[in-house]
Image (cartoon, rainbow, N blue to C red):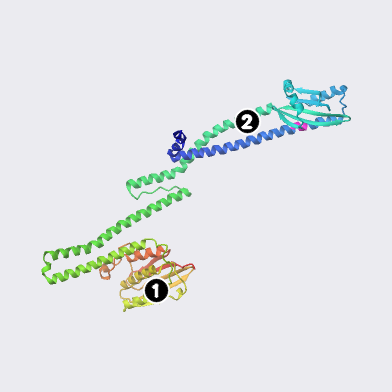
Amino acid sequence: MKAERYRFPICYHALPIKWKLTLWSALLLFLLFGAYNIVQYVFVERWMIKEEQASTQQDMREILNVLLEKEFRFEESEYSRIRSYLEKVNQSSQLIRVFDEKGLPIIAVSDDFPNEWIADNDAVLRANDNHSFSLDNMLVMRSPFTIFEFHGTVEIVKSMEDFEKLINAFLQVMLLCGLGAVMVSAFGGRLLARQLLRPLQAMNETMRRVKQNGLQERIQLTGSKDEIHSLMNLFNEMMDQVERSFAQQRQFVEDASHELRTPIAILEGHLAMLRRWGKQDPAVLEESLDISLHELARLKGLVQELLRLSRAERSVSGDEAREADPTPILSRLIKHAAALYPSFRFEAELEDLGGIRLAISEQHLEQIFIILMDNAVKYSGDSRTVRIRGAASDGQATLAVIDCGIGISEESLPYVWDRFYRADKSRSGEQGGYGLGLSIAKRLAEGCGGTIQIDSRLNEGTTVTVTFPEKIK
């Protein structure tokens, strides 16, 4: 029993999504069509019954008006005249009877009306006191009247067989249309499912090609600008980001390997030399140890920069305070830089930042501007002036570090954010650094919702502008 009970759900869940969409859309269309037909059937049936009742009631009023107008005394001598009139107004499949005050029929006329029906239902008719009711597919309507001393009742019994035939024919047409609607809805559901799933099938095929051919595969976008088009476009953008991330990761590994290979090779060469014969020569030993220590310090600095970059790329923890007052922090950094580089002049314009607070932690703000000021000093060339400016407007604070140094060429500007990239490769050994500072600064700035950009001209100087949102109090 359990296997039989759960067979249908299991089979349904095993169906492909296109068949599920076909079934549900076909079922929905069929239910809508069925509900419309049922409402239409009930409305037509009730409307036709009301029309029959209204028509019979109109006949009743006409008969009563004539009887009252001619003032029949309902004596036996007048029965023939009354019967003759009733036969003229009577309709097919209809019975008209006149009862006296005792409820006995004194006049009855019929036209193609089954007499056996009267015999079978006479007792029920006598016991029913309603003015209008239905009995065994017949519409019965009664109306009392009084003429002189005569108190009687007019009864009209109308057959509803023609009405039932029409309703049955209408029902058969509806059933046939319902069967046609099932086939049409199934076909329409199939077309609808195929149309809806076409973009998903394209995405599936693209993913399969990505698995086989690589990350360069993309979905061909259609001309329609609907939600499916937006989804496909978002998928292509996501694949672009994934491809860029893999390329950057590969470039990072290559650059990191290159940066680490040089000091390791130097260390390996000097240690091998010392093991062979350098231990006996104090001068060679001293020189090799100095070089080895220098390269170890270089390795240590590179590893620390990589750790800083890794921490910058991670999201800031929720319990870390993301609020900083820029004026005292920048003033303190300028004072430290002036002590560290006494030959440089640091000019600060921070008056517009008074009283505002930035949505970034103090540690990250310090780290960003240590990197930017250090770069400004390293690549200042013959200039010895570094300016730090600040301004606030529209809920944002803009901070800029400006130098008049060697600048960056237009060709190198798009790549300065890449890890291990150094625009002035000829002086990289002299200036030190590993090409990670700007990458770290960019990650930290964007991590708090800020932006950072560089404007530079070769031999004219560089301006690095950082924009932070203000902290909402």
Residue 209, quarter of the rendered image: top left
- Element assignment for label 2: helix
Would you name the residue on which mark 2 appears?
170
Q: Are marks 2 and 1 in contact (CB under 8 Å)?
A: no
Which residue sits at x=36%, y=63%?
Answer: 312
Left or right: residue 305 compared with residue 61: left
Query: Between 62 and 214, which is closer to the camera in this rendering?
Result: 62
Q: Which residue is the extreme one toward the right?
A: 148
Is residue 414 among the parts visible in the rendering?
no
Q: Position of residue 150 (x, y in %)?
A: 87, 28
- What span is colored magenta in the figure? 55-59
Tell me the crowding category of disc 1: few under 14, some 14 to 19, or many 20 or more residues within 10 angstroms, Cα based: many
Q: Position of residue 121 (x, y in %)?
A: 73, 24
Tell me the crowding category of disc 2: few under 14, some 14 to 19, or many 20 or more residues within 10 angstroms, Cα based: some
Would you name the residue on which mark 1 appears?
330
Q: Position of residue 77 (x, y in %)?
A: 88, 22
Main SS class of the magenta portion in the image = helix
Callout in the foreground (2, 1): 1
Is 87 situated above or below 219?
above
- Element assignment for label 1: helix
